[in-house]
Amino acid sequence: MQIGMLGLGRMGGNMTERLLRDGHSVVAANRTAEAVAAAVKKGAIGAANLAGIVSTLKGRRVIWLMIPSGDPVEQAVLELSGLLSPGDIVIDGGNSFYRDSVRRAGLLKEKGIHFLDSGTSGGVWGLKEGYCLMIGGDPEPFSYVEPVFKSLAPVKGYLHTGPVGSGHFVKMVHNGVEYGMMQAYAEGFEILKEGPFPLNLTEVSELWQHGSVVRSWLLELATDALRADPGLDHVKAWVDDSGEGRWTVEQAIETGVPAYAIAASLFARFASRHDNAFGLRLLSALRNQFGGHAMKTIDS
């Protein structure tokens, strides 16, 4: 089928290529002309902007947004509400907050336009392995776009999760779980590294991939990272967060769910960004004040 793709970054570009390989027609646009040219070289039809995508598509139009969450998606939805016709379909495949997706769906519904929220997991490996898709929205537009989902996902790799918002809700919690899993691996391997034995961490991570209950794709990626740089000497201990972990913890607080591991993993990311943090300096000073405990200073 024919589909428009706005956003040709690390995931949008690979998704476009995967769709083209499976025989779909893709009209693609991006902020940079270079990305559009690369997609055209692979068989896509280039467009200068969102309006160009809409004017190029024929019949019932389907637009997939693969752009940063927040204002970029908000502005795209607002623009599309004035460009599309009743029955057309907008899919947000980024990491938007699920309540924003519910609101945006309501805005488009007033114009007779359908909205699907597709939580998308797979990262830079999605081109080869396929993408895990968690899709919320009405059944009819989901069924209409299902050939696209089948092409993007591996076998059993996509699911109609329920009404609008449910796709991004499931993806939000998915990413919260991901935070906790990565934190557990990081802590475990540091304990191994600092332990009393001269362990080869690459070999240990490879071993755990065979028969162990902790085996996973994340562990395979840890093995790749350790094989490339066993001491991780070229990596700075600074970890960003893109929002989903925060939203998951906020949801846990709102619903009274004790999400210990996910919350701790989120705070660990915050801590990674503070060299010589003020709070830790105050902690050291307090121990010195009440107990006379030794305190390391800049001078010492």
Image: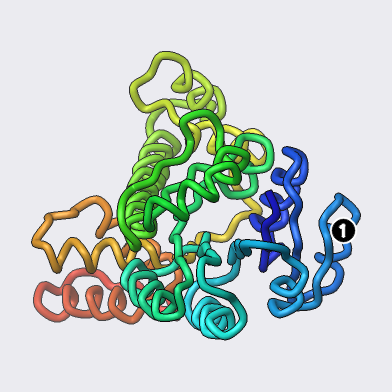
From the top left corner, tell me how far across and down residue 21 is, in percent. 77, 40
Extreme residue in the top direction: 211
* Residue at the spot 52% in from the left edge and 49% down from the top edge: 144
Residue 275 visible in the shown view: no
Residue type, numbered disc 1: Val
User: In the image, 176: left or right of 286?
Assistant: right
Give the residue number, with chain letter if any, for mark 1: 40
- In this rendering, the answer to whether 245 lies above or below 86 is above
* Residue at the spot 28% in from the left edge and 78% down from the top edge: 279
Please name whichever residue, 48 or 11, is drawn nearer the observer in this view of the structure: 48
Residue 290 visible in the shown view: yes
Please name whichever residue, 246 or 96, is drawn nearer the observer in this view of the structure: 96
- Quadrant including the C terminus: bottom left
From the top left corner, tell me how far across and down residue 70 is, in percent. 47, 78
From the top left corner, tell me how far across and down residue 123 is, in percent. 58, 49
* Residue at the spot 42% in from the left edge and 38% down from the top edge: 189
From the top left corner, tell me how far across and down residue 272 is, in percent. 43, 65
Asked which secondary structure carries label 1, the reply is: helix
Please name whichever residue, 91 or 299, is drawn nearer the observer in this view of the structure: 91
- In this rendering, the answer to whether 216 lies above or below 70 is above
User: In the image, 49: left or right of 298?
Assistant: right
* Residue at the spot 57% in from the left edge and 60% down from the top edge: 236
